[in-house]
Amino acid sequence: MPKHYRPAGKKKEGNAARYMTRSQALKSLQVNLNLFRRLCIVKGIFPREPKKKVKGNHHTYYHVKDISFLQHEPLLEKFREIKTYQKKVQKAKAKKNEELARLLLTRQPTYKLDRLIRERYPTFIDALRDLDDCLTMVHLFAVLPASDRENLEVKRVHNCRRLSHEWQAYISRTHALRKVFVSVKGIYYQAELEGQKITWLTPHAIQQVFTNDVDFGVLLTFLEFYETLLAFTNFKLYHSLNVKYPPILDSRLEALAADLYALSRYIDASSRGMTVEAKVDASSSSQSNDRAESELRLAQLQHQLPSSEPGALMHLVADKEVEEDEETRACKSLFKDLKFFLSREVPRESLLFVLPAFGGTVSWEGEGAPFKEDDESITHHIIDKPSAGHMYLSREYVQPQWIYDCVNARVILPTEKYLVGRIPPPHLSPFVDNEAEGYVPDYAETIKRLQAAARNDVLPLPGVGKEDLEDPQNLLYAGVMSRAEEAEAAKTKKKMAELEKQYHEELKKEVTGSAVDDVAAAPVVEGGDGEESSVPDAAQIAQDTADMPTLMMSRKKRKLYDAMKIGQKKKSESVERIKQRKKNLKADQ
């Protein structure tokens, strides 16, 4: 018998032993497709792509070890128990025993995903790295309407809204917000926590509509896991500031839909050494609360979140010293000593999140606001359309884009271009590297010079290089030259460049001419086959030298290199189209 002989069907090797199809996994676990998807989502198991697909390319493959992990998952038994219990409820309803069915529904078994969170994210940094999709999903469902058809309950929508507000309150309090970009899809935010950059997308404050091309069953399974993950993350972040979690909401502000201001407004009496009087809405509080219960509630609230001063979302800990880096200090002091008032047509929830994160004091139009519109200390009024009301001369009326552009530039930009009724400058994305793209917009150059002026740096003029500013004499001329002198200097520089180019061309002709003379003086050498040996072309030699590294590459690397060159060519063509479009617009004007 040969050494490697294996009877057919006795033992599998290679990819056939390491992977199995989805139908094989369902048969092994004895579950249906919906339950299998649910288990894979909460356990973090995803399909694999084996090098050799044994069953064919039209199958979905999973690793055998992943399926074995699912077989020993306690949550699988809990799902089976819930399914069995639901059959009892259906049986009671079929027998028209409504009382028994109602009793069984109150005793329905439940489950938690806390253990899976600790299993999938052993450290807090791991949870922060996987928080992008979590925040985007939670913020999306926070603005969706409840729907019985999609099994989206009001309780879940309120929970998503609470979690998103708690996250935004922490980011605003710790000044961890770094970038903001308003797009057609929504508003992109980027924060930095524990050295990790977290980017998420929030939808615009408009009426959302359910679509039929989305499987909300799968999304709700993801949301169930992400709610638990974000709750764990908020718990850890709040306790890092010695703040008890979850915070108690101010019922009065919550009833007024004051967004992030609905978070706690109570001061930490233990840290400030003073007692506070609880603000409770009489209409929302129960009539049966007596004085003893209110005193007990006040004693409990002494350890909750402190109140927010006018213009801050919330101060999580009063007088709490937090280690701040240079960028955090810059963000904290960007809108320092500035007071903003928001009109009702601007995106209030976004601005209530962004402005305090960069040190601004903010109020809005409506009940529960920290200060009214007629406050004389207001420096900026954020408005999106001309107002027919009273205009105050002591404040500036600007569009909301001014806030976002100042945040991304880290400087207070001039407000002339953002006045009400004017077309604002282009809203540039902070997530795009203009230098890497090869095209720098004009307004980006303007912002760059404003940033340099704020840092007291000196940037070169459009016709002057950085090396010209290294000489103090050139720096002096750059500061005091008139327009005529500047034009004359540019003309002289251009003339010198032309002379230098002419000199190089003459030198090249001399070298080429001497080589041709040497070849003409040399005798013609005949080859063995009767052909004359020709002098190699210099351009051909240079081309061969340039192609030599490519010839030495393997086929895989050469294809990758060609793909990179194609991408660079497409990028350069796109830049040229933008420049040509810009030139045409200037010509039309």
Image (cartoon, rainbow, N blue to C red):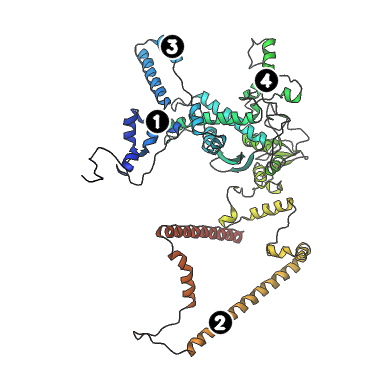
Looking at the rendered image, the disc whose residue lies closer to the viewer, 4 or 2, is 2
Q: Nearer the viewer, residue 66 or 35?
A: 66
What amino acid is at disc 4?
Leu
> Depth-wise, is mark 4 or mark 1 nearer the camera?
1
Name the amino acid type tagged 1: Leu
Amino acid on which the number 3 mark rests in the picture: Leu
Q: CA distance from mark 4 to mark 1?
A: 43 Å
- Label whose residue precedes the other's in the sequence (4 or 3): 3
Mark closer to the observer (2, 3): 2
In the image, what residue occupies the spot 61% across and 31% down?
A: 237
**Disc sitting over residue 70 in the figure:** 1
Instruction: Residue 42 in the image: state x and y as whole percent.
Output: 45, 31
Instruction: Give the labeled residue for mark 4.
Output: 301
Tell me what residue is drawn at x 40 percent, y 28 percent: 72
User: Residue 511: which disc?
Assistant: 2
Q: Nearer the viewer, mark 1 or mark 2?
A: 1
Q: Residue at the location (57% across, 79% down)?
A: 508
Residue ID at (42%, 58%): 559
For marks 4 and 2, the one nearer the N-term is 4
Query: Where, by quadrant of the figure, is residue 101 drawn?
Result: top left
Q: Secondary structure at mark 4?
A: helix
The image position of residue 30, as x and y in percent, is: 33, 27
Q: CA distance from mark 1 to mark 2?
A: 76 Å
Residue where numbered disc 3 is placed:
103
Q: Is residue 460 left or right of residue 563?
A: right
Q: Secondary structure at mark 2?
A: helix
Disc on the earlier residue, 1 or 3: 1
- Quarter occupied by the C terminus: bottom right
**Residue toward you, 496 or 182:** 496
